[in-house]
């Protein structure tokens, strides 16, 4: 890694790349050190207009002088994106945000012996509140690992994962996780409406309750269980609802859903390796 700020190239300028680029620029990274390759001309123009970064239609043009290459394309096109990048300099760090593609597979496509950080961000990165699990393969130096973490922290928190096999579990908890809270919020809103609340009121109450509970979890330093107990008056309304959740097996329902997502992550990884 250079001692000055590294030059970063994003391959793919879609939603996740945009949130990472926005985070970098907001953190004070110079736009001059960021490039993006994006085949869609309108998306390219928007990235130039919004962030003042250099944008290219061709991947190798964006990647040529970069210290860090962020692979931010869909898993289906990853192989065709990686193979032409196999000619890049040996010290280049690759950061992949694609779901379900392992470091060994990426390394083979990139020519072998590559420093690769595989990460799983989530969509709250779009509002700077993302959670990213990151695994670094043995070729990644401590300085490269720090650089990858700095890059990802522009969009939220990062958690280092020491065993790549656990990346499917990361995907199942935080990668897919926002959808679980969206589903719960939908269900809470519908349940409020079923009790007679107008839709606008039910939505506002459900959404703000989700936000408020999330902020308390993040900011109070107390466990979820403690915060739950504090809302729950003996024999009160919360107790009635929680007893109903427990009787219906909510914890088991969540465990089985996360197991299903973890299993699916493994299946997708095996498919991408074929
Ligand atoms: N959406 C999510 O919740 C999460 C997505 N991811 C991963 O992030 C990656 C990107 O996802 P999104 O940003 O949501 O997708 P997206 O579709 O918004 O962005 C992908 C971009 O890549 C561009 N592209 C297509 N072919 C290309 C090529 N050959 N060369 C360069 N660019 C090309 C597309 O024009 C598009 O702008 C995926 O691999 C996905 O698995 C990871 C975590 C969460
Ligand atoms: O649903 C998916 O497969 C991807 C991975 C995590 C979020 N979206």
Image (tube, grey):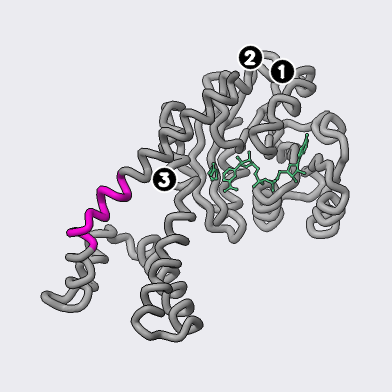
- Of mark 2 and mark 1, the one earlier in the sequence is 1
**Is 274 drawn above or below residue 256 in the view shown?**
above
Instruction: Check disc 3: other Cα within 10 Å, few if <14, some if 14-19, many if 20+.
Output: some
Q: Looking at this view, is 250 or 210 the one in front?
A: 250
Q: Looking at this view, is 102 or 200 the one in front?
A: 200
Give the residue at mark 1.
90
Give the residue at mark 3.
173
Residue 4 in the image: state x and y as whole percent. Answer: 72, 38
The span picked out in magenta is: 245-255
The residues tagged by marks 3 and 1 sit, at their Cα atoms, a distance apart of 34 Å
Residue 158 in the image: state x and y as whole percent. Answer: 49, 45
Q: Determine the secondary structure under disc 3.
A: helix
Residue 177 in the image: state x and y as whole percent. Answer: 45, 51
Q: Looking at this view, is 195 or 259 the one in front?
A: 195
Mark 3 or 1, closer to the camera: 3
Give the residue at mark 2.
113
- Of mark 3 and mark 2, the one earlier in the sequence is 2
Q: Residue at x 44, y 69 (%)?
A: 211
**Is 51 drawn above or below residue 204 in the view shown?**
above
Q: Determine the secondary structure under disc 1.
A: loop
């Amino acid at each position: 890694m250079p001692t000055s700020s590294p030059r970063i190239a994003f391959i793919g300028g879609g939603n996740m790349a945009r949130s990472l680029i926005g985070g970098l620029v907001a953190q004070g990274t110079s736009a001059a050190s960021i490039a993006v390759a994006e085949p869609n001309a309108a998306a390219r123009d928007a990235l130039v207009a919004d962030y003042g970064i250099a944008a290219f239609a061709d991947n190798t043009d964006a990647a040529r002088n970069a210290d860090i290459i962020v692979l931010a394309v869909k898993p289906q096109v990853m192989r065709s994106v990686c193979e032409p990048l196999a000619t890049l300099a040996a010290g280049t760090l690759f950061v992949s945000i694609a779901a379900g593609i392992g470091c060994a597979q990426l390394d083979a496509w990139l020519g072998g012996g590559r420093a690769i950080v595989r990460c799983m961000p989530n969509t709250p990165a779009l509002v700077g509140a993302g959670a990213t699990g990151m695994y670094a393969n043995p070729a990644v130096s401590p300085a490269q690992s720090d650089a990858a973490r700095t890059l990802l922290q522009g969009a939220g928190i990062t958690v280092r994962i020491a065993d790549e096999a656990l990346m499917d579990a990361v995907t199942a908890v935080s990668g897919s996780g926002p959808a679980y809270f969206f589903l719960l919020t939908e269900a809470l809103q519908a349940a409020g409406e079923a009790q007679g609340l107008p839709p606008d009121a039910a939505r506002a109450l459900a959404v703000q309750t989700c936000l408020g509970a999330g902020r308390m979890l993040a900011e109070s330093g107390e466990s979820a269980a403690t915060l739950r107990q504090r809302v729950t008056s003996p024999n009160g309304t919360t107790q009635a609802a929680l007893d109903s959740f427990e009787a219906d097996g909510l914890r088991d329902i969540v465990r089985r859903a996360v197991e299903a997502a973890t299993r699916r992550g493994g299946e997708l990884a095996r498919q991408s390796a074929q």
